[in-house]
Amino acid sequence: MRMAYRFNSHKSVSLFRNRHFFEIKFYMTNTEFQIPETNENFEALLNEQFGENGLTGSVVKGTIVRVTPDFALVDVGLKSEGRIPLREFGQNAELKAGDKVEVYVDRYEDKDGQIVLSREKARREEVWQDLEKSLNAGERVNGVIFGRVKGGFTVDLNGAIAFLPGSQIDIRPIRDITPLMGISQPFQILKMDKVRGNIVVSRRVVLEETRAEARAELIDTLKEGSILEGVVKNITDYGAFIDLGGVDGLLHVTDISWKRINHPSEVLSVGQTVKVQVIKFNEDNQRISLGMKQLESDPWQAVADKFQVGEIYKGKVTNITDYGAFVELEDGIEGLVHVSEMSWTRKNVHPGKIVSTSQEVEVKVLEVDQDKRRISLGIKQCTPNPWAAYVEEHPVGSIIEGKIKNITEFGLFVGLSDEIDGMIHLSDISWDKSGEEAVKDYVKGQDIQAKIIDVDVEKERISLGIKQLSENNVAAALEEIKKGDVVKATVVSIEDKGVNVEVNGISAMIKKADLSKEKANQNPENFKEGDVLEAKVTSVDKKNNKLGLSVKALEIDEEKKALEEYSSTSSSGSSLGDALGEALKKNA
């Protein structure tokens, strides 16, 4: 057998076979080797001749032979040089012939017969070796989180790509890791698999170790009143958690600023460095309460001197509620304008319909309570009181004209101007009518005349009356009637609850129970319009022009009188029946 390898211009190898022996010719060196017939492994002999010595897959030192615009030719002591792209040496790398570099032998030869070398893989091998040393020694390594993958994140460990599980990124869950990406930070290698190229790292382990050390040191020196620097770690609706370097403290929303803050995110952001003061430290549960506003002077200390009661100031509406609006007079100083102090005329409306957030308004200081940190303000007091102006032009006793705006169960509301209404109570509509009967002659939108009978500017009330426009004939008639008198009453109408009657022009009602002493005779249907009844006056209300009448009371009086007469005449032989009969005849 005969076999020969032929190298053509350092590029290719041709194989010839014969039964008896091997013949290898090296044209690039002008040498020829003859290998006698043998059973030894030809590949092993060839590798031994070429001097590869198992360099494939290892990192070796080489010398730069020549540098071209795109490649660097590197001699690693083998039969040919290898070409490495310049980009693998990094940007702006200054290379020249004779420089020593470490390279990775990827393959002994490619299709062109050249050794395949890689500077990039050599660097990776270096990194892997360093990472393996760190793993064995339990040391931390620096890396940069640069991407997100399923179940976690990718970390660049100086060229080697590692996997960071989501559960290992922090001690507690983090919603937004954006502030942690793109920055160099320490990690702990959990495991490595070079065959598969897998590296798993943890940031949480580093934090727990660092936190434990820093926490112990901080706790020993921590005390109320201490001023520290921290980083905003998380923001909630009620405040922010501040990392003090191994231990977290809570900065409540009310302790961020002296001025009103609706949400901590208005002032703070995750990752922001802030200066805080320890306002409370519980050694038992190691809870720390922090404050920022405590580092500034309290603006309420001199509030009474700055804002005098009765003075007018400008402010900005910061918040609107159902009961009023808060107005900022200066940084950290807010006062409340109650809804009742917003407008002289607009009642029962939401404050948001009168003012808007961020609106600049003039306010008058009504009250200052420095201890309770409260200032009561008024907006309407900064404008003339239309009630006072109206009353000045229309004093009590004036007769006005207006339109009925509303009819309620207790009276009529009359529009006196665009802003002011007056009220006519049911009792002031008519001298001789009351209740529903008094208002049935009026409709909404009707123009009427009325007299101003009372004014209360502070309570913003104007009382009107219609009946005061005419003489009180009922009052004059009531002057002639006294309680206990027996009067004749003419039936005007019949109702279920009694009988309406008229006595000398005065309207009154005899209730069903007062129609008779006997229950059988108390039915209002027993009477008809025009009937004349004798009744006893049981009450006289001159203020409300009301007269109380009772037939029953009269019958009782007549019976009592008959009994008295019987007692005085019993000696003459008259009977009780005769006396009662005479009394009944008189009553009939």
Image (spheres, rainbow, N blue to C red):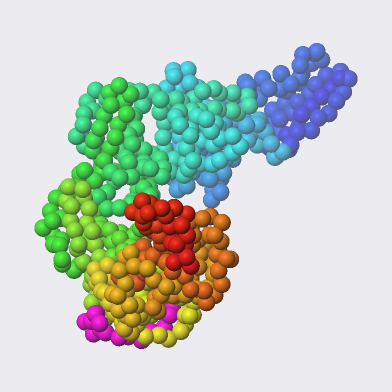
Query: What residue is shown at x 72% (from left), y 26% (from top)?
Result: 32
Q: Looking at this view, name the residue that lies furthest to the right.
A: 19
Residue 270's image quarter?
Answer: top left
Range of the magenta residues? 391-407
Query: What residue is shown at x 68% (from left), y 22% (from top)?
Result: 47
Q: Residue 145: where, in percent of width, then height?
A: 49, 38
Nearest to the observer: residue 430 or residue 327: 430
The answer to if 398 sits in the magenta stretch is yes
Residue 314's image quarter?
Answer: bottom left
Nearest to the observer: residue 408 or residue 269: 408
Q: Looking at this view, name the residue that lies furthest to the left.
A: 305
The answer to if 25 sits in the magenta stretch is no
User: Image quadrant for the N terminus?
Assistant: top right
In the rendered image of this protein, does residue 473 appear above or below residue 110? below
Q: Looking at this view, name the residue that lies furthest to the front.
A: 572
In the rendered image of this protein, does residue 222 appear above or below residue 327? above
Can residue 290 be seen from the camera position used here? yes
Nearest to the observer: residue 447 or residue 184: 447
Task: Report whether 296 appears left or right of 344.
Answer: left
Q: Residue 165: where, in percent of width, then height?
A: 54, 31
Q: Residue 579: where, in percent of width, then height?
A: 43, 57
Can residue 63 be seen from the camera position used here? no
Task: Report whether 416 appears left or right of 137.
Answer: left
Query: What residue is shown at x 42% (from left), y 38% (from top)?
Result: 184
Query: What residue is shown at x 38% (from left), y 39% (from top)?
Result: 233
Q: Residue 26: where, in percent of width, then height?
A: 71, 30
